[in-house]
Image (cartoon, helix red, strand yellow):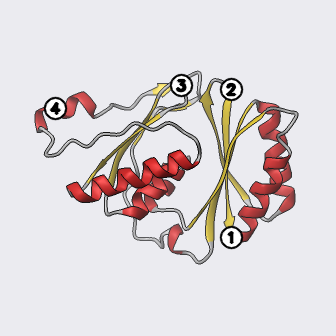
Amino acid sequence: MVVLDAMEKAAGVELLQVEFNDLAGAMMKITGPLASVRASLEAGAAAAAGMQVRCTWDVIPNPEPKARPGWDAKPEFNPLMEQSVVKVPAKAGKEKKVSEQAGFAVGLIETQGFTAVFEAIDTACKAANVEVLAREKLGGGYITVVIKGDVAAVRAAVDAGSRKVEGLGKLIAAHVIPSPTEAVLSLLPK
């Protein structure tokens, strides 16, 4: 989510799909003008590097239309992760976009271990006025909890929750995305 947010904010690109694998990896497929795609991918790679996550990327100029069946993934559900592994962003509706609301933020706390994530989210909710949007299993014992609220509340909640993980599991990542992009919001579980 953090990488996607950085990519979208860097350049005018459109998210086509996100495809997850069983190694807690994700393949983001975007389209747009060539220079925008390059700028977007560079920004995403920088965001990943800032979180000490290895990232591989490639640009295919003028993709061959006949190749689409090779990369256009069909819907797929992974029963072990209890979620879809191919996500397509929802199209924007007529209602007010959540990202246009002043001071809105999304927070993520990712751990390895259920006990750690449960303690972290309980602490986060007690620390600030936030709403839990989802809990996502990523495979390998990795779990991410997503919260929303105003920026200050989400920062306080993520900070408090992250501190509670030590000794119960491993904190993989904790991040706040102020004013998340529509693509990020469209991929959140409903």
| Residue at mark 2 to residue at mark 1: CA–CA distance | 29 Å
Residue 141 - label: 2
Task: Report crowding for label 1: few under 14, some 14 to 19, many 20 or more residues within 10 A (C-alpha).
Answer: some
Q: Tell me where residue 135 sits by quadrant.
A: top right
Looking at the rendered structure, the secondary structure element under dot 2 is loop
Amino acid type of the residue that numbered disc 4 sits on in the rendered structure: Ala
Q: Earlier in the sequence, mark 1 or mark 3?
A: 3
29 versus 34 height, above or below:
above
Q: Which residue type does callout 1 highlight? A: Asp
Q: Secondary structure at mark 1?
A: strand
Q: What's the mark number on residue 67?
A: 4
Q: In 3D space, how far apart are the residues under numbered discs 4 and 1 (Cα atoms)?
A: 43 Å
When the figure is inspected, residue 44 is found, relative to residue 155, above or below; the finding is above
Q: Earlier in the sequence, mark 4 or mark 1?
A: 4
Identify residue type, mark 2. Gly
Which residue: 68% across, 26% down?
141
Q: CA distance from mark 3 to mark 2?
A: 10 Å
Q: In this view of the protein, can residue 186 be seen by the observer?
A: no
- Whichever of labels 3 and 2 marks the residue nearer the N terminus, that label is 3
Residue 23: which numbered mark, if any?
3
First in sequence, mark 2 or 4: give its number.
Answer: 4
The answer to whether the residue labelled 2 contacts the one labelled 4, judged by CB atoms less than 8 Å apart, is no
User: In the figure, residue 129 lies in which quadrant?
Assistant: bottom right
- State the residue at coordinates (44%, 51%): 44
* In this view, 151 is above or below 125: below
